[in-house]
Image: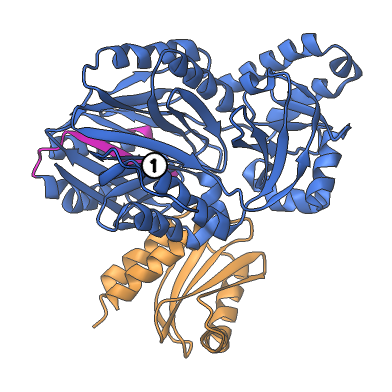
Chain colours: A blue, B orange
Amino acid sequence: MKIATGTASHRSIHQVTKNIIKDVIGDMNGTSDFLLVGFTPNYRSKQAYEEALTKLSEESGTSNIVGGTFPGVATSNGYPTTQGCAVMSIKSSDIHFHNPFSYSNIRTNPKKGAKVILDCHKKIEQKNKMGLFLSAGPFFEPDAYEQMKILDTFFANKFKGMFNAIGKIINKNMGKNGYGTANYADEILSILAKNKVNNVIGGATIDLDMRTSFQFEGTNVLKNAMVGTFFSSDKLQFDIDWSFDKSQKLNDFDVSEFLTSGYVQKINKEPARQAFLDLIGISEELYNESFARYANASLLYLSALNSEDKEHIPYVSICQSILNGIVTTIPERMLKKKNINADFFTQSGTGIQKSAYECAMKASRNIEKPRFGMFVNCSNRLLIAGDKIEKENVMIREAIGNDVPFITLYSGGEFSVIKNKPVFSAVSLHGMVAGENTDTAKNVVF
Amino acid sequence: MNDSTGISSELSDLIHLDDVEAAILFRIDGNVINSAFKEQHSNDILRTIQWCKANVEKVSLEMQTNNLSKVTYELNNFCVLFSVVNNVTILTTLATVTANLSLLSIETKRKSMLISANL
């Protein structure tokens, strides 16, 4: 098996591509079986990405390419960049890299997207399988939340059934314009889990300036699409896990009244927006100053649902001055459950570094000899860490081994299916490690 | 020996970021080693650069004394980010006040490392 990784940064996409070809593709002598490619979104033009992918494909000898645009990209041997490209190139006779798939109407028809993935999964004969899919992430106009005002009315509080449906229509309408990833990604994951797809990892492409992001399938550059592939092997094992910073639990967070479309009307029996601001203890003015440029999503303060197996799953709350409630990224499937038991967590720089170690340790605990890793990290964690973000990758190296190559893509919503359980979460890290099998699990202590 | 083409290219990369107006590599005594500016620049930015030049020695001393790797100032509607490159050089990045400083700090750190390798 031969693996090359590298990160390059430059104002020109042509120069970045040239550097990647020299430093990464060159190592493989034009014999790659698969490329995972993450470009940052600053190059903007679809044509520029198409040209870059065509060049990478020509030089690497494979059109088996999956990737997209992410606000930050990094590799085990490259400092993270917000203006460049990261590539992982693999050649291996032990792994079968299946042809990439795509579906271009993912925001409005996730069921069909799931079917595309399932069709690919059915054809695989090897015993160990790992799916990777990247979906279109959020982008929206500043006034996107205007249409949600109706969810604050007396009738919306009184007639929940009807307004659950209205909220769903609003979400779907906003979805067409780019807003949101939670529901359609969660729906796909849920379908995959029901159909016995064990291991899948993925994330959403995003431009933090809230412009269009792109997804790559071969040399095709797509918008509003899902792309992905499967790896399979009889020899290598793929393991996967995830984590978030659970170190600072603040309070119980009683989601008293809500609509299943992801709109929380009351927290701790009080109107949600004010209760939320009281809970985090900052004024609305300061909140707006801190989070307005992050689409008013509270990056540091996460509501985390306590799931059936007692594991917390974190979600972002979006607090808009024009709304009395708060918008949450909790998927509809989770809000349909009878008892919503939530807690409240604060994220810290040190905490997210530790959680990176935890994720990588858990993902590699059943693998004696890790060969490579793929990590989907939240772009919000990139914002929290700033220029200390490399420390997360140092933690990953510590956990899986200093010489194990990996790539990290900073996404707008990250997800996985782990042993038939779908997990869509926020401000979290999902990681996959591939390597040789072992029956003895590492003794992991955090 | 300095690779001035390499340094110039790294500074040009920085000013291609949407919110960055100028990137200047100072010696800690205030002399400019290399610089890059957006084509259009206002009087405000010239005033801010003047302030940087006049204060870089003082800021460098403060950073060295307190072992600071990065210092940010906000003035004239600009953010000024001083990042240590090595013992004698400081990278100064001028960005609009609305710039995302977390993302910018990642790229300035990367550029500081690359410039350091070029010096």
In the rendered image, which quarter is residue B112 located in? Answer: bottom left
Q: Position of residue B65 (x, y in %)?
A: 55, 89
Report x, y in % for residue B14: 43, 61
Q: Is residue B80 left or right of residue A199?
A: right
Depth check: A44 or B116 in front? B116
Q: Is residue A157 rendered to the left or right of residue B61? A: right
Residue A156 within the segment the image draws in magenta = no
Report the number of discs.
1
* Residue B49 point in image, percent of width and height: 55, 75
Question: Residue A384 appears in which quarter of the rendering?
Answer: bottom right
Which of the two residues, A250 or A140, is positioned nearer the viewer here?
A: A250
Residue B39 in view here: no
Tag 1, which secondary structure?
helix
Q: Is residue A82 visible?
A: yes
Mark 1: give few (<14), some (14-19) or many (20+) Cα within 10 Å.
many
Amino acid at dot 1: Ala
Give the left or right position of residue A91, taking residue A148 as reference.
left
| Left or right of residue A135: residue B3 | left
Residue placed at 79% from the left, 34% from the top? A254
A98 lies above or below A299? above
In the rendered structure, does residue A35 fall within the stretch colored magenta? yes
Question: In which quadrant of the rendered view does residue A272 lie?
Answer: top right
Q: How far across and how far down the image is residue A233, in percent? A: 21, 28
Whether residue B76 is situated above or below residue A125 in the rendered picture: below
User: Which quadrant of the rendered structure holds the N terminus of chain A?
Assistant: top left
Q: Which residue is mark 1?
A: A363
| Residues shaded magenta | A29-47
A188 relative to A77, above or below: above
Chain letter of the residue carrying label 1: A
